[in-house]
Amino acid sequence: MKHTLFAATAALALLAGCTQPMSGGTSAAEKRMSQLPPAPAPADNAPTPEKLALGKQLFFDTRLSGSGTMACENCHYRDKGWAVPEALSKRDDGKMNTRHTPTLYNTAYIEPLYWDGRSATMEIQTMAAWRNQMGADPDKIAARLNAVPAYKAAFNKVYGMDANGANIVKSLTTYVRSLVSGDSPWDRHEKGVSGAVSADAIAGFDLFLNKGRCASCHTPPVYTSGGFYNVGLEAGKATPDAGRGAITKKPEDTGAFKAPTLRSVALSAPYFHDGSAKTLEEAVRYMASGGKADPNKSPLMVDTKLTDREIAQVVEFLKALTSDEPLVRPTLP
């Protein structure tokens, strides 16, 4: 893994490639490893309060799109877990996307990005989404922003120069890196706060680690291994999505998609790369069943024989991973 976060959680990271569930319950060390460290950032885009504030303004500003009517927020709503409630969303030009909008929560920890991992860094991903999703010409948008005195002054304060495509991307990415879902009821439970979660959530965590085998692909503390897996969702489709296979050109990667973070997952229905699961319970039930038959399906996908009661308990645990930090909207210049 690119980030030292996963190396630092070696005991749990072993689950990313294991074929056997954990046994013996949850140790104190494993609990401690479920706490998120500070979000990593590259040396050439280190965060500052001024850069983050500027990026936040840009994220909510429709002037960043080609049409001038679409902001980043239009595909990433805070109350929807920084995703959208539709299976597929529209681009600035009105065309439909072909995959479900992924959450922006905790993306700082899980490069490469996109469902197929085609963007090695967050900066690359931001530029691609800005151009393709929002129909932006970076030079034209920079000129539009530089015509706003407050923006021109802010860019010169942060970067010592006017807005340009590169520093707009750096600002936006700095804000997105700050979207961390880390202070959830489950985190408070692991810190020893009595009554932070229900008994069902506690039972659900044990199932998540052991019988349910969920941590094989959704490793704490980010609740993703960062890997790509074929879970059978493209089986039987007339024009199946090759997923990771289209990027690596490896037959074994055909139909594989990135395992998403499960932090605040209760907010971001529908689920999966195609938005095919309408509810969290439906998504858990599908995964627990082992998924549909596919020649390239991951060997980790097996029927775990979870009962209806156990599936409900896993869902309760996942709901307990929901953070509740407030969204304070910026004032736009």
Image (cartoon, rainbow, N blue to C red):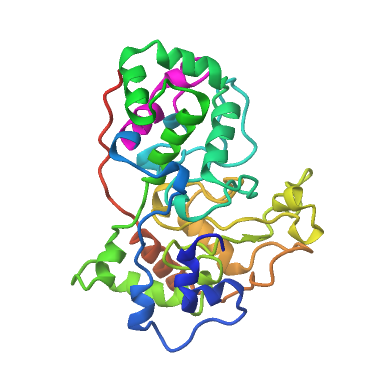
Q: Is residue 62 above or below residue 175?
A: above
The furthest residue to the front:
160
Q: Report the front residue among 99 and 158.
A: 158
Residue 199 pos. (x, y %) = 29, 74
Say which residue appears at 33% left-offset and 61% top-offset. Answer: 320
The quadrant the C terminus occupies is: top left
* 56 in magenta: yes
Q: Quadrant of residue 303?
A: bottom right
Q: Is residue 286 above or below residue 308?
A: above
Q: Quadrant of residue 81?
A: top left
Q: Inspect this view and state whether residue 40 appears.
A: yes
* 261 in magenta: no
Say which residue appears at 18% left-offset and 72% top-offset. Answer: 194
Q: Is residue 141 above or below residue 218?
A: above
Q: Inspect this view and state whether residue 87 appears.
A: no
Residue 20 pos. (x, y %) = 58, 82
Q: Quadrant of residue 39?
A: bottom left
The furthest residue to the top:
147
Q: Is residue 156 above or below residue 195?
A: above
Residue 119 pos. (x, y %) = 61, 45
The quadrant the N terminus occupies is: bottom right
Number of residue marks? 0
Say which residue appears at 76% left-offset and 52% top-offset. Answer: 236
Say which residue appears at 57% left-offset and 51% top-offset. Answer: 272
Q: Which residues are magenta?
A: 52-71
Residue 231 pos. (x, y %) = 65, 61
Q: Report the front residue among 300 and 311.
A: 300
In the displayed structure image, the side of residue 32 where residue 236 appears, left or right: right
The furthest residue to the bottom:
24
